[in-house]
Structures are given as C-alpha cells and as structure tokens.
Image (cartoon, helix red, strand yellow):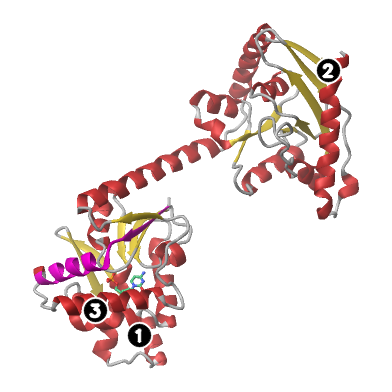
Amino acid sequence: MSFIVAIDGPAGTGKGTVTKILAKKFKLINIDTGAMYRCVTLDMIRKGVKLDETDKIIDILENIKIEFKKENDKDLVFLNGENVTEKLRSKEVTNLVSQVSGVKEVRLSMAGLQRKMAEGKEVIMEGRDIGTYVFPGADVKIYLDADLDERAKRRFKQNREQGINIPYVEVLENIKMRDENDKSKEIGALKLARDAEVVDSTSMSISQVVREISAIIDKKKKEIKLQAKIYKPRKDNAWKRFVRCIVRAVLVTAYRIAYHVKITGNVPREGAYILCCNHINYLDAAAIVLFNKRKVNFVAKEDLFTHDILMWLGHLFDAIPIKRDMQDIEAMKRCLKVLKNGGLLGIFPEGTRKGMEKNMKAKNGAAYMAIKSGVKVIPIGIHGTFKPFSKVYLNYGEPIDLSDYKNQKDKLDEATELVMNQIKELMEKESTN
Ligand code: DC
C-alpha cells in the first residue's frame, strides 16, 4: 500500500534531520529530493556542462543513476555507482544547485524519477514541491518553515560540524538567493499547498518538531485505517442474511414498543426504485429499512460509520457510506449498482436533518441517479416527534417517473423539486389520518 509523507519548506528549516528521524520511527523510505538535484549538479560540474547547454543536460538526465542506500545506519547517496554523500554538500554544488533545479528539463526528469521511486511504497519525501507538484495527493503534507536568520545560523553550524568553512554572511546570502530561486521556479516552485500543515520550527527543538509531525502522521494513519474499515466491501452471504433477520426482528420489536408506527402505501414487490424521504430524525432511516419487506440500501453519511455499533449495523444492512463534502463518485457507483441489480436505494434528498425547515436546497443526487438509470422515485413523507410512545407516520407515495428529464442536465433542480413537492404533500397527509 502506498503512503506518502511530503515535507516541504525552504532551506535550513531542519527538513533533512527531521525527515531522517521520522523515516526511522514510522519505517518509511526516505527520499531526499534535494540530494537528487545535487547529484545532477555535481554531474554537470564534473562534465563541465553549463546551464544553457540543454542537449548536454538532457544527456546527463538520460544516463544518470541515483541511489539511496543505508550502510551502518548512515544514509548514503550514490551517483552512477559512486558514494557522493559528502561531495553533494560542497560549496560548488550548493552555490549552483538552486539554478540547476530551476531548469525545466531537470525538474520534469527528477519529478518523474521521484514518482517512480515512491510507486506503491510507504515513503517520506523532503523537498520544495513534493506536496504541490510531485505528489499533490500526498497523504500527509507538512510545510516546515523558520525565520531566515535562524535558518542561516543552523546551516552555518551544520557546515562547521562537517568541516565546511563558509562565512556566516555568505551562508545567509546563499540561503536568501536560494529562497528567491526556489519560490520563482517555472515548474515546482516552493509554495504552501492549500492542505498542508505549517510547522514553524524557529523556536522549536528537533524533538518538538518530530513530536508535532508524528502526531499529524499518527492521526492520518488512524483515518486511513478507519476509511479502509468503512469502505471494505462486504459480501451478503447466508450467515449475514441470517444475522440481519434476527437483528431486524429485535429492532422492529423495540421500535414498535418505543413508537406507534403508522404506515400508508408501500413499495412494489419487485424492481428497482429510489426511495426519497424527508429527514427529521436519525431514526427515520431505520423506520424505512426495518418496516420494509424488501432490503433497502440506505445512503448514509460517512461520519455515522465512525461509531462501532452504527458501523456494524450499517454493514449488516448494506448501507452505502457517502462523503458529503465532495462529489463521491465511488458512492454514486455503488448506488447505481444497487439499482442495476433491481434493488431499493434509500436517500434523503435534504442531505441533512430538517433541511427543509432550514430552507436548504435539496440535493440533486437522487434525481440524477433516477434519470441516469431510468428508475422511478418513490416519495415518502415521514412525520413524528420521535418522543417515546408517540406516533410515527410513514406515508409512501406513487412512483414518480423522471424519464422526461433525460438529457436535460439543466433541469435537474426542477426534477428534484418535483420529488420534494410530493414528499411535502405526503408529510402533511398524517394530519388527515
Ligand atoms: O534541500 P537541499 O538544500 O538539499 O536542496 C538543494 C536544492 O534543490 C535547493 O536549492 C532547492 C532544490 N530543490 C528543489 O528545487 N526541489 C526539491 N523538491 C528539492 C530541492
């Protein structure tokens, strides 16, 4: 399974150090993309290739071999088979790399290589454009930042520890120049991704930064695990049908004890239909599912599945989880499959409880699917206070044919309104009962 952590940010923010620790902690493959640009730069310097010699740069890119290896717990970089880890940090490479990384051909080639290196793997990648350009869909996006002075101080200290003697002013100027270059690149410029978490390390220790990012990664891993649990397809086998039968009997009894359920109309014994109901309480979907002789696959918001018992019930009754804040194509496909197989699909067009009362516009999903699949909509009006022992009215209407709206995408609102008007009439029907 692929899992990508993108750590972007300007030079000197501690990306390298933090990434190494996180890679070890979460067992992620560490890909230092800056080192890849440094490899290209070193190769160009050695071969005497200038920035405007595009053909020669392309030749280098076509033949370059960059490898990351771990030896005695040390991260090493190999360029065409040679260990160049130390050489990549030399003054010559550092002064030129920012410009090299701005060459279009270099960027396209390195981004392609980075994507290939990460394919199907669990990786942590540090760089400038990982969360914005290389992997815009990365699972975790961190933008690590720090004040310019602080970054220059860190880089100066790091150089000294490595025996590289570059005066502080020069380090500062170099970082400034790189910031400018990094931010003004034609492709893959350094910028904050919309969905990235910003971590400002100016007054933080390494361990504080690691702790903060670890919490973000942990949270994402939990979310992914939960999503897998929610969306894992479950077969409707004999055992499941048996359990559903027992659970249904128990819940129907409980429902009948708690409420006086009055039902008018019903659903044809066979054939695909979309059941559209108003939504006043969490228990109204249960009423439709439980008091129906046929199985109803209800569309339910994803959040409901985060509760263990509701998730179990949801899967038992084959409810379809849906992400409400986006166009959920997967959920739509599952709904259409139910209809194609001649089943009943339950939807609240209001999208949320008491949407009509709040004057919210009904969603077009039900009308869209009805028109797309040629299936009729059965409107249902539900009415009740859901106070213990009160009456709950469930009024089924006649199937509505929306086939006249086929090929009229601009009239979806009208089709939805037609359904909603029928639902409103059926809601009011209880007062005459
Ligand atoms: O992180 P570093 O200092 O090793 O990066 C070296 C250079 O490469 C730096 O000037 C910015 C550039 N770079 C880039 O443009 N895109 C990346 N994803 C990583 C680094």
> For mark 1, what is the residue?
60
Q: Position of residue 117 (x, y in %)?
A: 38, 65
> For mark 3, what is the residue?
173
* Amino acid marked by disc 1: Ile
Q: Position of residue 249 (x, y in %)?
A: 66, 12
Nearer-N-terminus badge (2/1): 1
**Crowd rating for badge 1 (residues with CA inside 10 Å; few <14, some 14–19, many 20+):** some
Of residues 2 and 184, the one drawn nearer to the viewer in this rendering: 184
Question: Residue at coordinates 25% horizontally, 56% vertically from top-left?
Answer: 18
Magenta span contains residue 142: yes
Nearer-N-terminus badge (3/2): 3
Quadrant location of the C terminus?
Answer: top right
In the image, which disc is placed on residue 430?
Answer: 2
Label 2 with label 1: CB-CB less than 8 Å: no
Quarter, ligand 1: bottom left
Of residues 180 and 412, the one drawn nearer to the viewer in this rendering: 180
* Amino acid marked by disc 2: Glu
